[in-house]
Amino acid sequence: MALADILEQIAADAEAEAREIVERAKEEAARVRREAERRASERSARVLAEAEADARREAEAVRASARLRARDDTLAVKQALIDEALEAVAAGLASLEPSRYARFIARRILRAARGGEEVLVAAADRERLAGLPDAVEAAAREAGREGLELRFSDEPAPVAHGVVLRGDRESVDLSVEGLIEAERDRLVARFAAALFRTSEGDGS
């Protein structure tokens, strides 16, 4: 083969190889581009899904927080209403007509007394409970408990309203506040049932 033919053949082979390399490069570039686009699409979808999940979690957290605040507000309102009701009971007892007030306190004294105790009357109730000894005697007679030998002291009871029953070893707080506190759980249950029966029945 002539030298010219050989050179021409080499040039042709080189050109063909160059075209093949270029084609492979184009295919590889296309493949890389498709892979990059696929990964970008997957990443975009993943980021979007994560963003949506974050948004859902945040929305649920906001709803949960709102529910907690609403519950706390409702409890606060209910507690305020119950406290007002308890205060009204205390005010009502402290403002009873003297003879009814004396009978009320006398019955509480009779329940707590064992005999021989000393009765101290609140300074604010000294006049209104002037008939307390007679009321206690009448209540004891009705209950068949004469002879309790209670003593009515001139020393004021350290309470706002009501009395303190003082024995040798212990004292019993029979003040209006003390009596209400002793019955607090029962009173709260009754007030709650009366105040919130309708709303709780509606599921609110």
Image (cartoon, rainbow, N blue to C red):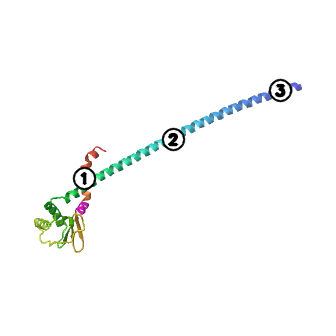
Tag 2's secondary structure?
helix
Establish if 195 lies above or below 182.
above
Residue topped by disc 1: 191
Quarter in which the N terminus is drawn: top right
Mark 1 or mark 3: whose residue is earlier in sequence: 3
Q: Quadrant of residue 119?
A: bottom left
Quarter of the rendering occupied by the C terminus: top left
Is residue 179 within the magenta segment? yes
Q: Which residues are magenta?
A: 176-182
Residue 47 seen in this snapshot: yes
Q: CA distance from mark 2 to mark 1?
A: 49 Å
Category of crowding for the residue at label 3, using alpha-carbon neighbours closer than 10 angstroms: few (below 14), some (14–19), many (at least 20):
few
Q: Amino acid at mark 1?
A: Phe
Residue 77 shown in magenta = no
Alpha-carbon span between mark 3 and mark 2? 62 Å
Please tell me which residue is depicted at 68% across the width and 31% down the height of the picture.
Answer: 27
Residue 139 placed where, x, y %?
12, 65
Viewer-proximal residue among 65 and 158: 158
Residue that badge 3 annotates: 9
Report the side of 62 relative to 121 (left or right).
Answer: right
